[in-house]
């Protein structure tokens, strides 16, 4: 795959790394692109991820940092090769689960033999691959040549309890668990069918998304056919000539009327469509097309020229409005991009009922056990922290039994199925935690959200929740099996979340304009989070990422964000953070709690403390973000 990709040039790398002035560093980056089959944009994205994860985002590139970066690239390539066979083994285990009589499937017991005759009775093995070796000699780090493997395992960690990120720490934490209700606002999506998606249904859903945004813009700005030039509409032959004087102050740019993609002319218009890439690979300014709706544009595609557009951030599948010109019918000259629209509010702010007491919400994203065992010691520690910190609600995001875990990939433990492991190692711990809290007079809640990497869940996104058949009746009211994605209401505070790594996925696919020389650098994480809200989808990429099985029709129908949330949870491999989004992007609190474990070492979780409005001067009922304290803590 590396040999088939075009090599990045020094000029492309220099544009991507504008802060690097050392030509030798640029040449080394070009060699890395050639060695690992990366474009300049891909290399820049991976470099930015490493810098953020190591809290060095503001530091300039050095040879030592570049050497660490090379080790990270090599480790990732080696790990990807090692997990190929393990994923094939897990896929075979899931195939066996599909043909069980009680499994939800498009196959029945009469047609199951047809599936087995195609797949065979034994796991499908991929051909062995040679171990990865970089074709360029590695740099040394500081001349020490030492071992740069991660530090000791979970039991030997020394930073447990360390706070690595905060937001509004002056507000403090709730000291008790109030009697506040927790409920799921989204029901389980319809059963997604793996490799059984009708193309006509998929095309109809995709067109509905574009047509819906188009209809909103038409309602606000009209169509080109309805527009009347201002000089004609207001012309009066008897009117006096306009008075001379100073020019009025400039006004914000107006949005011209909406037109179909095939509409041509010298007048600016607003064109609505879906961003498409001409071919495979990442977007670049020469490969962007816009696909319009069936009603107004007959689903045609035209090329999008961004040469005159100073600010944009695009990715395949994004539904946008383009203000510009279409002079010849085959190319849109964009001058401004409308990147979507925010979801509407669920209800007026003065009608919302928010809990009058402070409460804590703890959030953690899997894996919940380290790669060297399935003892689930990190989960035990997390539950102990939830008890110690008086968490009203514990939101747990999968994977719980990760398909990439060495024990799971090798077939699990002898004498126990994956469902039995989930019941005995995970649900049993959660039930014991809840039973102890109920006995003490508290009533915490636990919300479980599956992941496509969970071997006990349907591996197609969007996912229904875990089955409730194994939950003890004594704590059933406190356990909530949420779908993926999910919307959870905790004391009137709306939390939306998804266990897919949306930030990493969008970051790898996004094409953004370089910042102006004197303009402040935009927060990239908040920009990626704004894509989720303005597209009203947790996974708006089309085509979807190759490593996530997605039922596109169900995603467009059931994977959306129907109302503006108060808190947006986006768990990611990227560095954890808690930030308030700008008011233009909805003003929600955006949180990445990080992963609870990272290979054999511990990771992080987040604690949110929501306080009453009366404690915050000038806060409105809807201002949840400004009255929420956040701590991101090492497990």
Image (cartoon, rainbow, N blue to C red):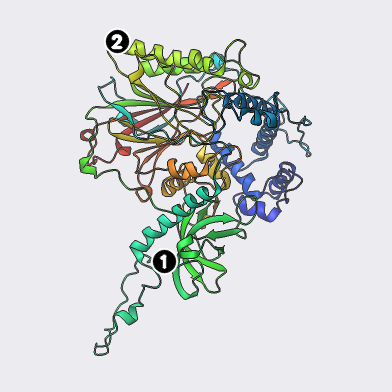
- Categorize mark 2 by other alpha carbons within 10 Å: few (<14), some (14-19), many (20+): few
Q: Quadrant of residue 149?
A: top right
Quadrant that contains the N terminus: top right
Q: Along the polypeptide, which appears first: circle 1 or circle 2?
A: 1
Q: Where is residue 451 in the image (x, y as percent from the top left)?
A: 51, 30
287 sits left or right of 462 in the view: right
The residue mark sitting in front, 1 or 2, is 1
At a point 31% along the width and 79% down the height, the residue shown is 233
Residue situated furthest bottom in the rendering: 238
Marks 1/2 in contact by CB < 8 Å: the verdict is no
509 sits left or right of 188 in the view: right
Identify the element where label 2 is drawn. Answer: loop
Residue sitting nearer the eye, 417 or 66: 417
Q: Where is residue 306 in the image (x, y as percent from the top left)?
A: 55, 63
At a point 45% along the width and 20% down the height, the residue shown is 161
Regarding residue 411, the answer to whether it shows in the image is yes
Q: What residue is pinned by disc 2?
A: 440
Regarding residue 521, the answer to whether it shows in the image is no
Residue 258 - label: 1
Q: Position of residue 239 (x, y in %)?
A: 24, 87
């Amino acid at each position: 795959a590396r040999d088939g990709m075009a090599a990045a040039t020094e000029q492309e790398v220099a544009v991507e790394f504008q802060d690097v002035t050392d030509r030798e560093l640029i040449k080394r980056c070009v060699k890395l692109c050639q060695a690992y089959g990366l474009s300049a944009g891909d290399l820049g994205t991976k470099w930015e991820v490493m810098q953020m994860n190591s809290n060095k985002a503001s530091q300039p590139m050095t040879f030592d940092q570049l050497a660490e970066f090379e080790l990270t690239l090599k480790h990732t390539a080696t790990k990807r090769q090692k997990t190929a066979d393990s994923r094939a083994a897990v896929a075979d285990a899931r195939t066996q689960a599909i043909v069980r009589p009680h499994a939800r499937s498009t196959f029945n017991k009469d047609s199951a033999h047809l599936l087995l005759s195609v797949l065979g009775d034994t796991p499908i093995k991929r051909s062995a691959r040679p171990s990865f070796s970089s074709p360029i000699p590695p740099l040394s780090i500081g001349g020490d040549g030492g071992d740069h493997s991660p530090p000791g395992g979970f039991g030997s960690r020394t930073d447990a309890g360390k706070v690595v990120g905060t937001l509004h720490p002056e507000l403090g934490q709730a000291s008790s668990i109030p009697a506040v209700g927790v409920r799921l606002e989204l029901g389980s999506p319809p059963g997604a069918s793996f490799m059984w998606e009708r193309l006509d249904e998929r095309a109809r859903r995709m067109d509905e998304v574009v047509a819906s945004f188009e209809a909103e813009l038409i309602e606000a700005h009209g169509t080109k056919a309805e527009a009347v030039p201002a000089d004609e509409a207001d012309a009066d032959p008897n009117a006096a000539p306009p008075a001379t004087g100073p020019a009025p102050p400039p006004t914000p740019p107006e949005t011209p009327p909406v037109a179909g993609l095939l509409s041509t002319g010298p007048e600016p218009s607003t064109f609505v469509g879906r961003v498409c890439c001409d071919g495979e690979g990442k977007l670049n300014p020469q490969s962007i097309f816009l696909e319009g709706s069936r009603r107004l544009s007959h689903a045609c595609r035209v090329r999008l020229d961004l040469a005159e557009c100073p600010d944009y951030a695009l990715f395949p599948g994004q539904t946008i409005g383009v203000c510009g010109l279409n002079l010849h019918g085959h190319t849109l000259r964009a001058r401004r991009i409308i990147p979507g629209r925010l979801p509407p509010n669920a209800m007026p702010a003065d009608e919302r009922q928010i809990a009058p007491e402070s409460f804590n919400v703890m959030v953690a994203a899997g894996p919940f056990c380290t790669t060297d065992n399935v003892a689930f010691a990190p989960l035990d520690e997390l539950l102990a922290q939830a008890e110690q910190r008086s968490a009203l609600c514990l939101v747990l995001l999968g994977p719980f039994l990760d398909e990439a875990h060495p024990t799971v990939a090798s077939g699990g433990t002898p004498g126990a199925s994956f469902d039995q492991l989930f019941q005995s190692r995970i649900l049993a711990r959660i039930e014991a935690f809840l039973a102890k809290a109920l006995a003490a007079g508290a009533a915490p809640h636990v919300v479980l959200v599956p992941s496509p990497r969970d071997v006990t869940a349907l591996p197609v996104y969007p996912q229904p929740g875990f089955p409730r058949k194994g939950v003890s009746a004594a704590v059933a009211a406190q356990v909530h099996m949420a779908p993926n994605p999910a919307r959870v209401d905790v004391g009137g505070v709306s939390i939306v979340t998804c266990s897919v790594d949306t930030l990493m996925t969008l970051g790898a696919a996004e094409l953004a304009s370089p910042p102006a020389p004197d303009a402040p650098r935009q927060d990239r994480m908040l920009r990626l989070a704004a894509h989720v809200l303005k597209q009203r989808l947790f996974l708006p990429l089309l085509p979807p990422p190759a490593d996530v099985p997605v039922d596109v029709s169900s995603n467009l129908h059931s994977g959306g964000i129907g109302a503006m949330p108060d808190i947006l949870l986006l768990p990611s491999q990227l560095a954890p953070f808690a930030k308030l989004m700008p008011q233009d992007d909805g003003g929600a609190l955006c949180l990445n709690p990080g992963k609870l474990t990272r290979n054999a070492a511990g990771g992080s979780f987040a604690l949110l403390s929501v306080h009453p409005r009366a404690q915050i001067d000038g806060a409105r009922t809807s201002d949840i973000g400004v009255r929420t304290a956040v701590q991101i803590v090492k497990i």
